[in-house]
Amino acid sequence: MGRRDETPAFEWFPRGTPAGGGTPPPGRAPAERAPPERAPPERAPGERAPAERAPGPRAARGRDEGPAEETLTVPQVALRVKSMLASAFPEPFWLVGEASGLTRGRQGASGHWFFNLVDDQSADSRARACLSVTLWRTSVTRLFGPRGRLRALVPEDGVVLRVKVRPDFYAPRGSLNFIIEDIDPEFTLGNLDRQRRELLARLEAEGALAWNRAVFLADVPLRIGLITSVESAAYNDVLQTLAESRLGLTVLVCDARMQGEDTGRSVRAALAALLACRPDVILLCRGGGSRLDLSWFDREDIARAIATCPVPVLTGIGHEIDSSVADAVAHGSFKTPTAAAQFLVERARDGLREVNAAFAELLRLAQDAVSDGQALAAEVGGRLRRAALGRVQREAGELALDRQALASAAERSLASARHELLQVRERLGRGRHMERLAALDAQLAAQRERLAGAACALLDRQAGLLSAAGDTLRLLDPRHVLARGFAWLRRPDGSVLKDAAAARAGEILTAVLRDGDLPLSVRGPAVPGAEPRPVD
């Protein structure tokens, strides 16, 4: 099985080489095991092997020199070993150990299974006792075939097994092997269930079962990380469900082992790779399988990696009847991978419906606010127009009264002066004062002209004041002010914003312009010292 690059990339994260990778354990290779038909026939104790030879010259010299040590041939030693094994293990016995280096022969080839059973209690992995075991093809078919009673329990590396074995010493290779005759499924499954219960109890005591559930899950998760075995049924089901939703979701796929001793390392590496891409949610999915196949998701390393993940993790592992520790610590668990994908699709659709409803309500409120503002502006403009017209009319009336009073006063003054002039003229008569009278008459005429000019100037000034008042009133008309490039800022409650310091950051205002309204948002506090400038 070839290695794959473990460097993650966006949208695709290949997995590493599975643990074992088909490499036989040190010291023994599957090719070195001989099939049963090559084993030599057993001999009774004491029977001499055909290849046994007479003692050589060294043995003869030893007899001359004194008592000689016994010298055995290789067949004799092999026979004694077989005899001792037969005496020590007269009947098949049960053996407990952890499977390691499992190699399954193809059905078309040998069909035999070869692996080691190592001590599962030793803390030092380098010094653990190890025994070679073999499961012949006939036993494989009997136990794990379509009608076998163990077809739901397929051994993997790292699984502790209880097997019934008998020893077999193969003299041509000098190898000791143990032939498996039966496997106890209750021991393995019971041990897995016990470990699962103990792990759940520890995690519950620590509060770890609620850690990932406390992580916020987005209302519309659009960036989805997927951890599964690429090209598996679960992989195809999830991608098909997400694609059929037509929601424009982004899927970050990370290939990982879903079974075997390398599952924990592969899943942890996949989680780390996806976290670097900042997904909204992570899906951990695999299809159904045997109880032993799914037991890899009862391991503590996977459970803690999910529990401490800062992103919500949703699991879809196995079928409806399956449940694992990974399901217990995840943010949410679903019976199948398809159900997990459907949950995300429905959540995204619900979120989009809420966003659309909120947008429609916001649009309605904005339209109502604009209508209310327009009505208020029309009302205020009408009041200003009426007030300006009333003020102009009052000023015009007062100016007319002043004009009439001035004309009357001028006429009275002229009449009085004329009367006095006539009296003086009569007194003077035709005497020497006629010249003086003519001079006074000229002075009177000049004063009359000055008085008339002063009256006209006063009337012109009053008319100018009246015209300026009219211009001021026209300038105060809001329509003319807006036409000059100024704007009127209105708050959502309808009040007018007069001071820049009264604006609040984030407040929504409406600028009333000469040709319509413009919504604005206050981005910060007012800038002190800023001078208002009209817009051309």
Image (tube, rainbow, N blue to C red):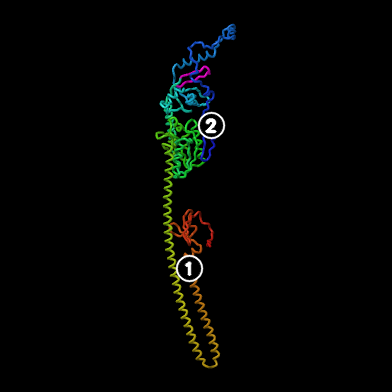
Residue for point 53% across, 17% down? 172
Which residue is most to the top? 64
Q: Amino acid at mark 2?
A: Gly
Q: Extreme front residue here?
A: 108
Label 1 sits on what residue type? Arg
- Residue 296 % position (x, y): 46, 32
Say if the magenta span includes residue 175: yes
Magenta span of residues: 166-180
Above or below, comparing residue 387 to residue 290 in the picture: below
Quarter of the view holding residue 148: top left
- The extreme bottom residue here reads 431
Does 511 sit above or below residue 400?
Answer: above
Name the spot of residue 201 as percent of width and height, x first.
42, 33
Residue under numbered circle 1 = 474
Report x, y in % for residue 219.
44, 45
Q: Residue at x 49, y 86 (%)?
A: 418
Given residues 412 and 396, the one toward you in this image is 396
> Are there few (<14), some (14-19), or many (20+) residues within 10 Å of tag 1?
some
Q: Residue at x 51, y 21 (%)?
A: 33
Q: Secondary structure at mark 1?
A: helix
Q: Measure the alpha-carbon separation of dots 2 and 1.
A: 90 Å
Looking at the image, can residue 304 be seen? no
Asked whether residue 513 is drawn in magenta, I would say: no
**Which label sits in the foreground, 2 or 1?**
2
Q: Earlier in the sequence, mark 2 or mark 1?
A: 2
Q: Is residue 385 above or below residue 19?
A: below
The answer to whether any part of residue 420 appears in the image is yes
> Quick check: marks 2 and 1 in contact, CB under 8 Å?
no
The secondary structure that dominates the magenta segment is: strand
Residue 237 is situated, as x and y percent measured from the top left of the image, at: 44, 38
Q: Which residue is mark 2?
A: 2
